[in-house]
Amino acid sequence: MHRTGQLAPPSRQEAVDRVQAWANTGHSRAWIGSACGISPDAIADILHGTHAHIGRNTIRAILTADISTATAGFTATHGATRRLQALAWLGHTCENIAAATGQSTVTIAYHQRGAGTRINPTLWAAIANHYAATEHTPGSSDLARTRAIRRGWAPPAAWDDIDNPTEQPDVGQTVRPGALVEDIAWLLRHDPATTSAHLAHRLGLSTGGIDKALRRHGRADLLTQLTRNAENINPRGKTA
C-alpha cells in the first residue's frame, strides 16, 4: 500500500527527532526505551545514527509512545522540581505533597529545592500525577506560599511546557489581572469577611495591586465587598 500511495509510511526522521528531543529533555536511554518498548541499545543506535535503517515497527513504537509511562532508567529532575515549587507557590506544603504521593517529606523537599539531578520513573510519576490533579487548587499554607514567592519560584500559570529544560517561566503572567482576580474571588468565597490587606499578604502583592486588578476586570462587586469588610473592621463615623 505504501507503493501505491494509499498509506504513507511512518516517518523515520520524525521518529529520530522525537527520540532526540526526549534525550535533550533529560530522559535516559533506558527511560525512553521502556516507554517505547524498545531496548536501550536500540535507542542508543538511533541517537548515534549507527544504523541508517530503522524498522517500521520500531518507528511506529516511537511515534505512538507516551514518554510518561517509562518504567526504567532516569530523567532530569527539572520537571519534578518545577512542579513541586509551583505547588508551594499555591500554598501546598512538602508534608501534604509527601502524604498525597506516598513519598517521604525529606524526598519531596530534596527535589523541590533542586538538590538532585536525576529522578526515577516511580517518583516522577507520583509527582507529575499529583501536580496534574492539584495545579488549579490553592493550598492552605500561607507560609509555603510566602517562602515560594520570596525564593522566586514560579506558579503553574508561568509555564507553557514545564518539562522543557530551556524554557524560562513567564513571571509576568503570574501577576496578570485575570489570574489575580481568580485568586481573589476564590479566597473571598472561602473567607467572605477577608480584607484587601489580608489578600495582599497572602498573594505577595500590595493592596493597590489588588484594587488595580479588580478595576481592570470590572469586578466592582469584589471591590465593594472588600470595602465593606474593611469598614466592618474599622467602622467610620461611630462615636463612643
Image (cartoon, helix red, strand yellow):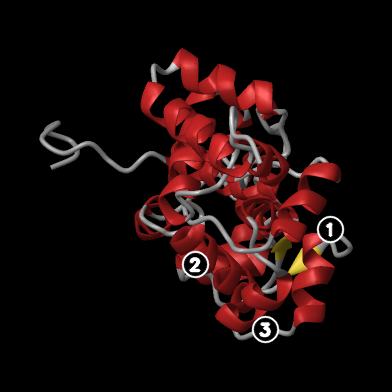
Q: Position of residue 168 (x, y in %)?
A: 72, 31
Q: Which mark is residue 114?
A: 1
Tell me which residue sits at (10%, 35%) in the image: 6
Quarter of the rendering containing residue 218: top left
The quarter of the rendered structure image containing the C terminus is: top right
The reply, left or right, for residue 24 in relation to residue 150 is left
Q: Which mark is residue 214?
A: none
Marks 1 and 2 in Cβ contact (< 8 Å): no
Q: Position of residue 13 (x, y in %)?
A: 48, 36
Q: Which mark is residue 103?
A: 3
From this view, report whether residue 92 is shown above or below residue 72: above
The quarter of the rendered structure image containing the N terminus is: top left
Q: Give, as a three-letter code, the residue at label 1.
A: Gly
Q: Residues within 10 Å of mark 3 (few under 14, many from 20)?
A: some
Q: Residue furthest front?
A: 240
Tell me which residue sits at (59%, 41%) in the image: 195
Q: Which mark is residue 129?
A: 2
User: Label 1, label 3: how many angstroms apart (C-alpha)?
Assistant: 16 Å
The local secondary structure at tag 2 comes to helix
Q: Give, as a three-letter code, the residue at label 3.
A: Gln
Tell me which residue sits at (72%, 71%) in the image: 94
Residue 226 showing in the rendered view = yes
The reply, left or right, for residue 145 in relation to residue 210 is right
Q: Give, as a three-letter code, the residue at label 2.
A: Asn
Residue 38 showing in the rendered view = no
The tag earlier along the polypeptide, 2 or 3, is 3
Q: Residue furthest top?
A: 216
